Amino acid sequence: MLVIQLNELMLHPLTGHHCTCTSVAGQVETYKLVLSQFDMHHLVFGLVCRYRIQSDRKVAICSVHPSEQATLQCLGCVKAKIPVAKSYHCTPKCFSDAWQHHRVLHDRAASAVNENGNEEEELYGRFNSSGSGVINASLSGSASSASLTNGSTPLYPAAVTQRSGETWFEVGHSKTYTPSADDIGHVLKFECAVVDAESKHHVGHTNTLLTSRVIPAPSPTPRRLIPVSGLDAMAPLDSDGRIASSGTFTVLSYNILSDVYATNDTYNYCPSWALSWPYRRQNLLREIVGYRADIVCLQEVQSDHYEEFFAPELDKHGYQALYKRKTNEVYNGNAHTIDGCATFFRRDRFSHVKKYEVEFNKAAQSLTDALVPNAQRKTALNRLVKDNVALIVVLEAKFSNQGADNPGKRQLLCVANTHINVHQDLKDVKLWQVLTLLKGLEKIAASADIPMLVCGDFNSVPGSAPHSLLAMGKVDQLHPDLVVDPLGILRPHSKLTHQLPLVSAYSPFARVGAGLGSDLQRRRMDATTNEPLFTNCTRDFIGTLDYIFYTADSLTVESLLELLDEESLRKDTALPSPEWSSDHIALLAEFRCKPRPRR
């Protein structure tokens, strides 16, 4: 579905003015009207009309720079029956620069029909930096109007100036409007008028808003699920790309980038319209729903966004929601915008058994009361209190893979979801919070024979002390991260252990011959740590911070969501981008419960 995205607009009905905005495919736009107390007694919200300029000829849009008119088309895409929107480019240089990524479309199309390489080479030619060998068709009447700018001028114009003498025709008459594919390439005009409740006459001026040309919603190539189990390496995939098995379940972990952190100063390489929450929330929802995960663990979910958007929207797709907001001893902003961890599960696959909430601030208070002298407790708490939380959920599966040996046995599953948001200089605090979480999970494991998943953004790179504790069950007493411990909370170092048999879900990608299609994924792994090369990619940092750990004695990994390559993301500088609306990438793993011996 194509919709237009506009920033929330505040209009006063009695002071009409002309407004402009950037239009983006992918969002429904609504108006908010500011009325005085007098207005509320005498006026009603009357007319919202949507027009498309009739004399404005529809044009093809560049697939790389959607604010630019296309001047050439790739004939290879046409022949390969690739979606036509991806075949357009604004200049030969644009086509040349994009060729390395563009050719992937050709390769996939050729692979799908099992064509040989000779025919493809003859059709597409070989690219060099000058663009020689390009076969393209110039779009008549448009070449002279190309105006791509690669300097400081923004690629996405803020507005289109209205010209006199043009004819508009109405395409909508409501408070919201969802543009169709016919609107792409056109300018839209929105008119808002206030009507007297009694006379039905317009009051004051009509407010008008013009958009830039409507652009197509970015459409990233869907990420595939790659089998990694030797048993199921050739197992059939269903229409959603999932292994066809009733005894497996999928888990998604994703830091979605809270709106309060998504500032233009931090991510100034991302177009403002793509960074706005109204756009990002729809793009994130589309992505999350598209994975069809049975369990979804999200981090950096603002409390207002959870209540007003994610919980009701995912409820429509069959998910039950649980949420733990971060504490606010440190945070001094709006209480409604505090973020937290949200866990969703499909009601047809699982039922809720129990919920545990971990507040690391409370654990810090207990720790300082026990270990720190009274005179130093305030200083200690200033270091330890970071408002971080974890949400632990015990679920019962509504499916069974226990087999005939264990008929009717309950299959429980414990899922931990956390965000360890601690400054990199506070290595002792970060490790202590991870240890605190694992000790809590050990208590649950001791009380029940239950498989466990530990998901989240740990803000810890592979090889760091928190990662070593998670993946190895201990931390080397000579690890450099242990040097920083002014409060002595990590001593003795021998206590930095746990007994959970945790393994990183993505480690199978590092194994040779792990499964069909995993060769490419192995190149996106760090062979020294058996972790992805990155899960977080900004202009200033790239590395792995997010993980899904599982108890290897009770679960096996069947398949994994393919990783992204850095080069494909750098075409938009970094994350977030118009295609991917967080600075993190989603991780997803499919698991199977191991049959447990009868006791």
Image (cartoon, grey):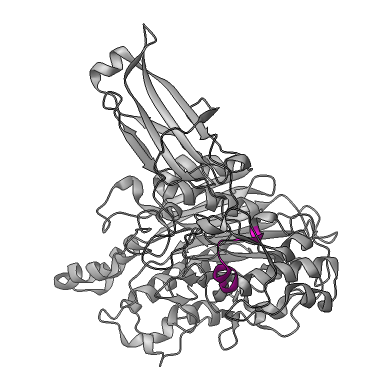
Q: Is residue 563 visible?
A: no
Of residues 408 and 299, the one nearer the viewer is 299
- The quarter of the picture where the C terminus appears is bottom right
Spot occupied by residue 316 in the image (x, y as percentages of width and height): 60, 39
Number of residue marks: 0
Residue 552 is inside the magenta segment: no
Spot occupied by residue 28 in the image (x, y as percentages of width and height): 51, 39
In the image, taking residue 437 as reference, residue 512 lies left or right, namely right
Spot occupied by residue 207 in the image (x, y as percentages of width and height): 35, 29
Q: Residue, x 51% and y 25% (percent of image)?
A: 173
Query: Given the current orientation, which residue lies at the most extreme bottom position?
Result: 478
Q: Residue, x 35% and y 54% (percent of image)?
A: 260
**Residue 444 sits above or below residue 273 on the image:** below
Q: Residue, x 54% and y 55% (percent of image)?
A: 69
Of residues 374 and 156, the one nearer the viewer is 156
In the image, taking residue 102 as reference, residue 385 lies left or right, namely left
Residue range corresponding to the magenta coloring: 86-97
Quarter residue 597 falls in: bottom right
Of residues 440 and 573, the one nearer the viewer is 573
